[in-house]
Image (tube, helix red, strand yellow):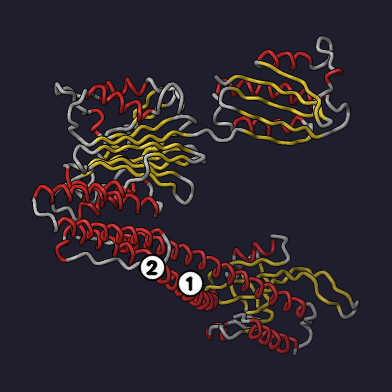
Amino acid sequence: MRKSVFFKLALLIIPIVLAYEVAQLYMSYQSVYNANIEAFTKVARSTAQTAASIFEFYNPAELDDNRIYSKQFDELSRMWGVAYLYVVEPDAETKSIKYIIIGFGDDAADIARQTRYAGVEVEGGFSDSMQQALTSGEESTVVHEKTELDDTLTCYRVIDTQYDQETEDFAKLDKPYLLGAEISFTSVMKKFQSRFHETAVYDLGFTLLLTVAIFVVFYFRVNGPVKRISAGMKNFVHDREKGVKKLQVKGNDELAEMSRSFNMMTEEIDRYIADIDNLNKEKHTQEAELAIARNIQTGLLKPSRYENGSVCIHAVMRAARNVGGDLYDYQVLDDGSVFIAVADVSGKGISAALFMSRAITLLHQYALLGYSPARMLGEYNNTLAEFNPNGLFITTFVAVYNSETGTLTYANAGHNRPYLLSDRLIALDGAAGIAAGIFDGFAYEEETVTLQPHDVVFLYSDGVNEAENSGGALFGTEALEDELKKHIGRRSGEQGGSVSDDILKTIEAFSDGAVQSDDLTILTLEVKPKPAHSEITVMNRPENLTALNEMINRERDIPEEIKAQLLLIAEELFVNICSYAYGEGEGELTVAVDSDGDAVTLTTADVVAIEDYDHENSVGGLGRFLAFELSDGHTYAYRDGRNILTVTKRIR
């Protein structure tokens, strides 16, 4: 069953959205729940504090006090939403309590109104929570407990003083009273659920709108153009007799550019087909068709040379016939990374060329969309396998080089293993998978390798190692590796031509005029060294040595053993300058590191004046001696009012 990119994206995004929404609802639940508990805890404390202030003036001698205070407690309970507000006289020994005053709120149970009243004594009513409140020493204690009447959030407050009318002052009681403010937890949870439901509805609504907006944008801005391009390609390959409909071009993005290229390609084919129809002989017709296919094929390939500040690329494709099934491609992506690919279609001639043109278009499209090498080959394989009536397949190697990190990430669909020419010859034989176009649904893997300046990645098709001479002998993989080893350590333009040029010359000499039996493709990517200048300006303090060490460690072009010596030189000179260059004072010093590929120089300013150095007897002389012994040369100079010390260390 065919699955579109839109459907696959939906399968990817929907679980993510659901997981996000579950997490969001969980956090909302916790947030609203905690907020409700905190709010009702404050209510319980405030009610208990207010009731305690009232009760401190309670006089049991006044017969109306119980009625008056109970009425006030009733009003407080209804006003604050408290179910029960009471004062009890606890008896820890008998585990009983005696109600002095009690008020009921709207949430109070009917049974409580009948059984709880002033003067009633409840045996076993003295709970562990009451005991904790009496002994904790806290002014008030809030607990969540279940009573015989309800599940409550209760604030207990100890009252051990009362107003004495005779002395007109507060006096200590013989034994304390316990004031309780009980809020129905059932009521709390109802209010919490109401608030949470509102929050959940808002969250779900917002997430749904956002998800729909994303799908709508993707469907109209990406999925639609991709489907039109894919349908046009299928029509171009399989249904040319019915005519090729031009693709509608909208906008100026990569998809629009691909549509324009496809339209131009179909127009060019139509012109050449019209010329073919005018030919009377089959031979001329075949030659014209081959010329068209070759023009289309070579028009799809990038120029043979490309260079920017990060890489130098050289590529060549020689077809065994007028047209072939090999391809190469490279592209500088939006983030500055470089995409490279080499592929080989099974078969030769026009059918292979058409299959090749579709393959290179797909690779180019997925590279511009920013797919990883593994995902790129997965989508590429599925699309080719879906519409492949001739049963062709294509071996493909793709890679993306990140010039910022120096990493090359690659994946391989049954292609010849490429080579890395570094300090030794390394076969990039990881992440192997089946050739594309045979079975859909295959998951490809990818590997990553770190490249150094002047490293060369060598990609090729089997037309290289399987080149034949007039006697039918093959050039062979072993001979190819031997030739590549000769280029290790050689830079572009040195000791002859490039790697690809030299390999081609070697194969031509081996073939000795024999007819080329297979398409031959080579693509090389050489890493160019970054501009090697780093500089920092710091105060002459020893702790700033860390910044200097970090700057040196960032220099990727310097071998590790040389870098270790350079770090020791920098440390000895830096500490020496910090200790003696400014006497007892402080000042700035600038340190710069420059590399030209063969040597690295470390320059410091300001150092002690040259005439002030006592090289044999001064403090710090041993450190300078060690630094100069490790270096390959050093110079002093006075420039722009500063003393400059330059130390040179050869890299190669």
| Residue 609 x, y percent position in the rendering | 84, 22
Which circle marks residue 250 in the picture?
Answer: 2
Task: Give the quadrant of the C terminus.
Answer: top right
Determine the residue located farthest toward the top in the rendered image. Answer: 616
Q: Nearer the viewer, residue 374 or 199?
A: 374
Q: Quadrant of residue 183?
A: bottom right
**x%, y% of residue 555?**
58, 31
Disc 1 to disc 2, C-alpha distance: 36 Å
| Front residue (pair 89, 559) | 559
Please say if 573 is above or below 78.
above
**Residue carrying label 1:** 203
Residue 127, picture quadrant = bottom right
Q: Is the residue 9 above or below the residue 478 in the image? A: below
The residue at the point 85 percent across, 73 percent down is: 170
Decide which of 97, 420 is in the foreground and name it: 420
**Badge 2 element:** loop
Residue farthest right in this picture: 167
Task: Please say if 481 is above or below 614.
Answer: below
Q: Nearer the viewer, mark 1 or mark 2?
A: 2
**At numbered mark 1, what does the secondary structure look like: helix, strand or loop?**
helix
Residue drawn 60% across and 28% down? 595
**Image position, residue 237 (x, y; %):** 19, 57
Can see residue 618? yes
Label 1: how many residues lie within 10 Å, few (<14), some (14-19) or many (20+)? some
Horizontal arrangement in the rendering, residue 251 relative to residue 516 (left or right) = right
Residue 149 visible in the picture: no
Image quadrant assignment for residue 401: top left
Check disc 1 and give the amino acid type: Asp
First in residue order: circle 1 vs circle 2: 1
In the rendered image, residue 282, in percent from the top left (x then y), is placed at: 8, 50
Between residue 155 and residue 335, name the one nearer to us: 335
